[in-house]
Amino acid sequence: MQQLVVLSGKGGTGKTSLVGAFSSLTDKKVLADCDVDAADLFIILEPETIEKADFYSGRKPMTNKEKCTECGICTELCRYEAITDGEVDPVDCEGCGLCALACPEEAITMEDALCGEWFIADTRYGPMVHARLGVGEENSGKLVAQVRKLAQSIAEEKKLELIIIDGPPGIGCPVISSLAGADLVLIVTEPTVAGIHDLERLIGLAQHFNILPLICINKYDINPSKARTIEEYCQSKGLKMLGKIPFDVAVVKAMVEKKTVMEYPCPAVQDAIRDIWQRVEETLKEKRNSHDQEGR
């Protein structure tokens, strides 16, 4: 089993559209949408849910009104100003637990917090795992880890060779959780100043985990000079540039119609994505062969 993570420095770069296109180009894979804060791969693939479960992480205070004497100790001690007359504001509360420790009547107890839910589903291109984090909830890194764990279990059970992970944007905790233990990372960037900056940070993160970063430029023709700058940067760093995808409004139209790019008439984009996927497969095969030789 190998794991490919598709990342970008910010939302809207085209990461999910690329993963959706990849899903139609290969068999024997599991899809994992690890952008749990704003999952959207399900919009394109319209999964049919097979199993779902609540996700609990962290603890939050609950007040027993029958025991509470409204002494005000919890209100006085709470540095987040999240408690008034024994009532806890779940938005302001950070779950530190001080109120429960300090309450002389033991009216406040810490209980497991419901943060979101995860789903195992079938799509027209195979099995998929995705999740939804609750509004304003934290611990997205743990939920990403749960999504990956479920995807690995499905791959093992069905003897599937590849997990394609639609990672979250940026370089924060959920991105790190998406990357750990992966075989390859494909970074999708744009020909902008911010795109170059984000690319540098993601490359540094991938190299920190000793994961080979592959690069592709989406919408390269909206700013050819910046695209050349990215290519020159990758060449100077010895990084593998897999290809460039042209801008096409049809990509957005395909998403609106709940289709992958490969299911919609946009031949230039489709040809570019096929070339990129072929190079991804070649790199995965090289890593697999290298691993087999080391095993011998």
Image: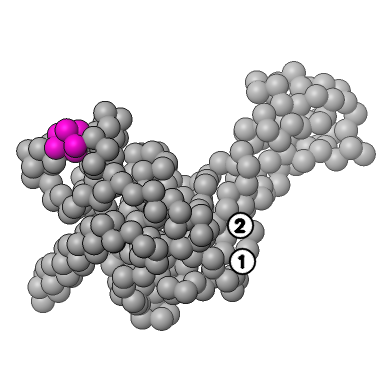
Q: Quadrant of residue 238?
A: top left
Query: Of the residues under marks 2 and 1, which one precedes in the sequence?
Result: 1
Q: Along the line of sight, which residue is nearer the eye, 174 or 112?
A: 174
Q: Quadrant of residue 20?
A: bottom left
Residue at 65% in and 21% down: 79
Q: Quadrant of the C terminus?
A: bottom left
Of all residues, the one furthest to the bottom in this rendering is 158
Which region is colored magenta? 224-230
Residue at 78% in and 37% down: 108
Give the percent coordinates (x, y) of residue 194. 30, 30
Residue denoted by label 2? 117
Residue at 66% in and 50% down: 114
Q: Are marks 2 and 1 in contact (CB under 8 Å)?
A: yes
Type of amino acid under label 1: Lys
Question: Circle 1 sits in a helix, a strand or a loop, which is it?
Answer: strand
- Apparent side of residue 230 relative to residue 259 in the rendered image (left or right): left
Type of amino acid under label 2: Glu
Of all residues, the one furthest to the top in this rendering is 76
Residue denoted by label 1? 52
Disc 2 to disc 1, C-alpha distance:
7 Å
Q: Along the line of sight, which residue is nearer the eye, 84 or 269?
A: 269
Residue 114 visible in the snapshot = yes
Question: Circle 2 sits in a helix, a strand or a loop, which is it?
Answer: strand
Give the percent coordinates (x, y) of residue 197. 26, 31
Q: Residues within 10 Å of mark 1 (few under 14, many from 20)?
A: some
Give the percent coordinates (x, y) of residue 217. 24, 45
- Apparent side of residue 226 relative to residue 37 in the rendered image (left or right): left
